[in-house]
Image (cartoon, grey):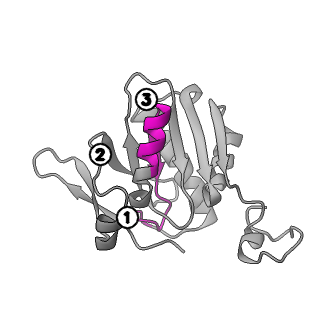
Amino acid sequence: MPPPASYEFLTSTENGENKMSFTYASFLKENFMNFVPDNIEVTTASTRRGNKIAILYMQNNPSTKLTFLLSHGNAVDLGLMVNFMYELGTKLDVNMMCYDYSGYGVSSGRPLEKNLYADAECALDVLRTKFEVPLDRIVLYGQSIGTVPTVHLATLHRVAAVVLHSPLMSGLRVAFPRIKRNYCCDVFS
């Protein structure tokens, strides 16, 4: 199940832009990042399944050739990914985009497999249209459960690269590690 939201989006009264604000009190005083970098743009988009997902775009270098589309693990949301995005994007000199799955953070809907695919497709569409990043400059990066929508997108689109960080072999094996084989009813197998 998704963790409680670690952030919220606040709309500026001056220009109508969304800003990210952390909501965990313990996160602010104990976390490695207690600020939201200035190079972040936050937005929402509607998926083909009718959910509204939160999206975070971090432009580290306007002239960089690559942008990573990050699909995060199941125990985090966008607020908990900001530091990772900042560090990875800065070290690799790439732009970063991450999105929350339906039911995570401030995204509406429920965390279902069908929604996961629709969320990823929506995020990729926003990256291509709103931020004008062509497919040949996009690196799909998935971590843990995020490898599922990453592989889904990779089967549909020819992108610059695909990174699978601790991918799932089997949905059942995650829940029941003693299972030694895959079953036909296994989610994500």
The amino acid type of the residue labelled 3 equals Glu
Q: Residue tagged by mark 3?
A: 132
Earlier-in-chain disc, 2 versus 3: 2
| Residue 95 shows up from this direction | no
- Graded by Cα atoms within 10 Å as few (under 14), some (14 to 19) or many (20 or more), the crowding at tag 3 reads few
Residue 75 position within the rendered picture, expressed as x and y whole percent measured from the top left: 53, 67
Separation (CA) of disc 2 from disc 3: 22 Å
Q: Residue tagged by mark 1?
A: 106
* Quadrant assignment, res 5: bottom left
* Disc assigned to residue 37: 2
The one nearer the camera, 171 or 50, is: 171
Residue 67 position within the rendered picture, expressed as x and y whole percent measured from the top left: 49, 34
Instruction: Single out the residue that lies furthest toward the right.
Output: 181
Question: Magenta span has 76?
Answer: no
Instruction: Single out the residue that lies furthest toward the left.
Output: 14
Earlier-in-chain disc, 3 versus 1: 1
The amino acid type of the residue labelled 2 equals Pro
- Graded by Cα atoms within 10 Å as few (under 14), some (14 to 19) or many (20 or more), the crowding at tag 2 reads few
Q: Are marks 3 and 1 in contact (CB under 8 Å)?
A: no
| Residue at point 32%, 43% (across, down) | 40
* Quadrant assignment, res 130: top left
